[in-house]
Amino acid sequence: YAAKETGGRRLRFSPALDERATSHAQLGAELRTALDEGQFFMVYQPIVALPEGRAAAVEALVRWRHPQRGLVSPAEFVPVAEHNGLIVELGAWILRTAAARMQAWQCELGPAAPGYVSVNVSARQLSEPDFPEFLASVLAQTSLPASSLTVEVTETAVFDSSTAMEALRAIKALGVRIALDDFGTGHSSLGLLRTAPVDVLKVDKSFVDDLADTGHSVIATALVDVSAHLGLTAIAEGVETQEQADALYRMGYRYLQGYLYGRPEESPTFRTPVASTV
Ligand code: C2E
Ligand code: MG
Ligand code: MG
Ligand code: MG
């Protein structure tokens, strides 16, 4: 089992699909039904700002409650949805849902609301010619300020693709920020940080997992330094222990995300922390 939950109700993902029992084609067909029958829902995980520990932002993550299989991991179904193209429609639903939720928090909570919602956008979505236009329409329909939305794309999605780069420029022109997700796992071109219109660098969990490894901690330090020099915000992903948080803080990280601060939940609460977390 992948030990991840949606918070209060402590839901666990179902065991990985058995290749022999369930083909990707079957899963793909079920995704269509899932969209039509409303089996998807969103969870939100805080990205905290140190030293205060307030939720500076939330990352929106999709979940699928399958009527027979239970909770299926996005690591399993997002690639299938990308492959059969359904990610475009699912991604549109994700963006509308997350934007509307963010707007509702701003109305309810005012200054206590997180500063922005960060939404994962797949390569396939980004390459749709009308994606920036669609994004603009979501902002208009939900009355969400562009500055309250960030889109997360992976290096692989933008690397070597002039179409993706153009889309990013158009997105940025709307006032929406762009985060490079899972940095350090793909092509990891530092040149990309300079040429792509990126605002946020999300340093992959693999570096955080193994900070005791000198090589990993050297890279984690280099990435926060490069970010500062290029005017990017660095976020460390997958922080699970106080030791990791302390080490990252000493390296210069001021934005952390991980189970230490909160799991993805359907209805997270945003309280103003009373004590510093570091
Ligand atoms: P990601 O965008 O890098 O999201 C971070 C993943 O790490 C999430 O897994 C999150 O639950 C998990 N995580 C956060 N903190 C910790 C921690 O401290 N420890 C551990 N072990 N894990 C942590 P999740 O929700 O299962 O999503 C997996 C991937 O699926 C995402 O990676 C993203 O690539 C994709 N995904 C999820 N939601 C969406 C979505 O709405 N749209 C698209 N296109 N992709 C999505
Ligand atoms: Mg992400
Ligand atoms: Mg990530
Ligand atoms: Mg990751």
Image (tube, grey):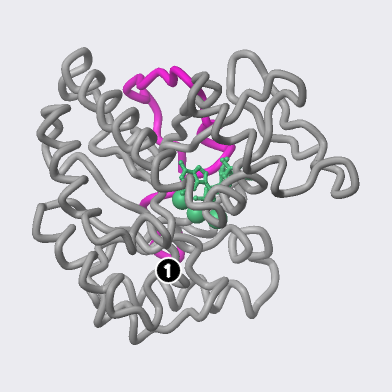
Quarter-wise, where is residue 275 in the image? Answer: top left
What residue is drawn where x is 65% and y is 28%?
5
Report if residue 257 lies within the magenta region: yes
What residue is drawn where x is 44% and y is 71%?
155
Of the residues shown, which amino acid type is indicated by label 1?
A: Ala
What residue is drawn where x is 30% and y is 70%?
164
Report if residue 251 lies within the magenta region: yes
Foreground pick, 83 / 265 = 83
Identify the magenta region. 250-278
For the N terminus, give its image quadrant.
top right
Decide if residue 160 is in sight here.
yes
Up the image or down, 137 lies above or below 7; here it is: below
Foreground pick, 251 / 83 = 83
Q: Position of residue 225 (x, y in %)?
A: 36, 75
Q: Position of residue 166 (x, y in %)?
A: 21, 72
205 displayed left or right of 188: right
Residue at the farthest right position = 20
Q: Which residue is mark 1?
A: 157
Foreground pick, 174 / 237 = 174
